[in-house]
Amino acid sequence: MLSLSKLGLPHPLRSSVYVAAAVVGLVCCSSSETERSTTTSSGSSAATSAESSEDLYVFGPWWEKAASTKNPLDVAELGQREGGAGLVRGLEDARYAEVSRLALPDVADNGLAIGALARRLRAAGSDAEEDGETLVAVLRAPPRIGERLDPEGETKAREDLLALANDGSAPRKLRALAVTALRQLAARGVGDEAAIPTDLDEP
């Protein structure tokens, strides 16, 4: 490296040169740090944007078609395209809840909907009776897949259904649907039938 002292510069001038060099160095470091910060920030923003895109679900045209026609073929196509998980998503959308309930009993992996339907039945919303009837239809449908697809969901469903069945202040129809669903779950080996209330049974 070239020494400033060898250039024969006066001492005050050499000091000025040292200061200028230091300033240039600081500016370069600052520029580099800013560039790295901008790059990191851009990468983080892109990752967040990608995650948001993954979370965003777009209902395809087959949803609208099946919801508007209620044609069994269109409903069956919807079930084949979406499966149990997709139809559960449809339950949460007012536009497609009805057609989701129509399609659920006939899809092979309808067991994925048991937890969601039981939760909706217990919530006693405006569609609770329809949700309960769909739940019973799903539980009565012959299993097409040997293994239990969602054991945790079935266990939670039993808890929700027992709470509703034992709630004397709940609508009788909803309690009856809960009892029926509980017996179907017991037949599948989920829970003990002896724990199911019998006060709604015919004498």
Image (cartoon, grey):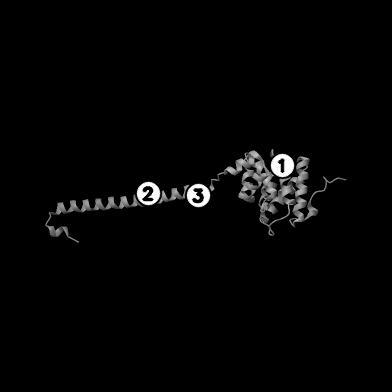
Query: What number is the disc on residue 38?
Result: 2
Residue that badge 3 annotates? 51
Query: What number is the disc on residue 60?
Result: none
x 16%, y 57%: residue: 4
x 13%, y 60%: residue: 6
Q: Closer to the camera: disc 2 or disc 1?
A: 1
The part of the image, by quadrant, that contains residue 177 is top right
Disc 2 marks which amino acid? Answer: Thr
Q: Residues within 10 Å of mark 1 (few under 14, many from 20)?
A: many
Q: Which SS class for mark 1?
A: helix
Q: Earlier in the sequence, mark 2 or mark 1?
A: 2
Question: Which quarter of the image is occupied by the N terminus?
Answer: bottom left
Q: Nearer the viewer, residue 113 or 33?
A: 113
Q: Are marks 1 and 3 in contact (CB under 8 Å)?
A: no
Query: What number is the disc on residue 130?
Result: 1
Question: Which quarter of the image is occupied by the C terminus?
Answer: top right
x, y (%) of residue 141?
73, 52
Q: Which SS class for mark 3?
A: helix
For this view, does 43 lie left or right of residue 141?
Answer: left
x, y (%) of residue 40?
40, 51
Placement of 6 over or under 165, stated as above or below: below
Disc 3 marks which amino acid? Answer: Glu
